[in-house]
Amino acid sequence: MTTFTFRDPVYPADAAAIAEVLNAADPTWPMTAEQVAHYQAARDPALFITEVLAVQAGQVVGTGSLGHDSVSHEDWRYWGDLAVHPQARGQGIGAALYSELLRRVQERRAKEIRTMLSDLPHDAPGVRFITARGFVPTWTRYESSLHTDTADLHAFDDLMERVAAGGIVLTPLSELSGPEHERWLYELDWLLFQDVPMGLTLTRRTQEQWVKDELKDPTLRPELSFVAVDPTQNDPLTGFYIGYSTIGWNEMGGYGYIGMTGVRREYRGRGIAKALKVAAMRALAAAGGGEIRTFNDAPNVAMLKMNEALGFRRTATRTRYELRLEGEQ
């Protein structure tokens, strides 16, 4: 057994090593070094984060972080992740990383820590690790998937015709621009986001931070993401935009995933949200096809039913775990 040491990460130099550990620990959601570096650089500098690496024989074998969530910022609550390379487990590295991160946030009078893990086999050691330390399950999110090769995309012809007949134009994000474009999307996203049952106290990002997080995300596929446009509408906040749905692409995993999907309240019940997803499915099929994954919280019954009707099938359950820290209640 080789001893290990701790140090803070240096970006972008450590991005590749961090990605290697993360990918070994969770092969279902692989990340490139460029993504790791981008997400670190794009973080809101006003929010706290602390990160630590475990190094053994000159190699990064573990990584962990605790920090504030930009979409649900409460100064006393921290979200975290911890990963140890499978080849380096069983030596106390994870426990030591956890203790160091915990010490750092307790110095800031942290009251609660949250994390999320799945019921897939690779996360089983992590679930055992955190539940042994007092974390309890508090929220459920379902992961579902479909492949365009097996989806009956013509089954929705009537839906697409009906939405078009109602005057709604589904336009690829890649074809939209102009001085108001980012502001309209930003305002629309905030309206829609507040209606998503996530079990969180939501906080609003600045437009600049939202653009960094969403529109400049290197995984975003704007040609597969669609905005629902009503040319007769010109809202002071959202302009002609009344709904949208985004697709990101995991290049290493070879699959797409749905980000936000939603429609303004006064336009709901007309099939527009479903049509946005169908438009994305058809665009991906035309580009060669592939898998699309989506994630929905358990209370979001309407979206779960919609996805099932589109052909998505449940593949995993992700659970949010929370730890209330003693002495900080």
Image (cartoon, grey):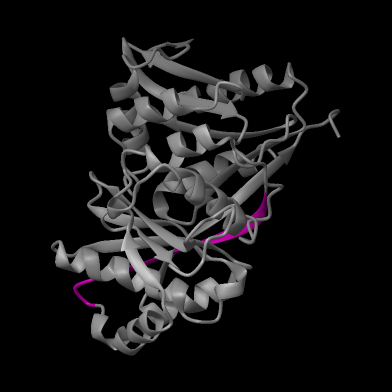
Query: What secondary structure is the magenta-colored segment mainly?
Result: strand
**Residue at horizontal 37 percent and vertical 43 percent from the top:** 26
- Residue 103 % position (x, y): 67, 18
**Residue at horizontal 42 percent and vertical 11 percent from the top:** 3
Q: Quadrant of the N terminus?
A: top left
- Residue 248 % position (x, y): 34, 50
- Residue 105 % position (x, y): 68, 22
In the rendered view, does 25 fall on the left or right side of 174?
right
Q: Tell which of 299 and 236 is nearer to you.
A: 236
Q: Tell which of 25 and 297 is nearer to you.
A: 297
Q: Is residue 159 above or below residue 241?
A: below
Membership of 146 in magenta stretch? yes
Q: Is residue 180 above or below residue 33?
A: below
Is residue 147 something one can see in this rendering? no
Q: Is residue 46 above or below residue 203?
A: above
Q: Which residues are magenta?
A: 137-150
Q: Is residue 303 above or below residue 245?
A: below
In the rendered view, does 156 fall on the left or right side of 187?
left
In the rendered view, does 282 fall on the left or right side of 311?
left
Q: Quadrant of the C terminus?
A: top right
Membership of 186 in magenta stretch? no
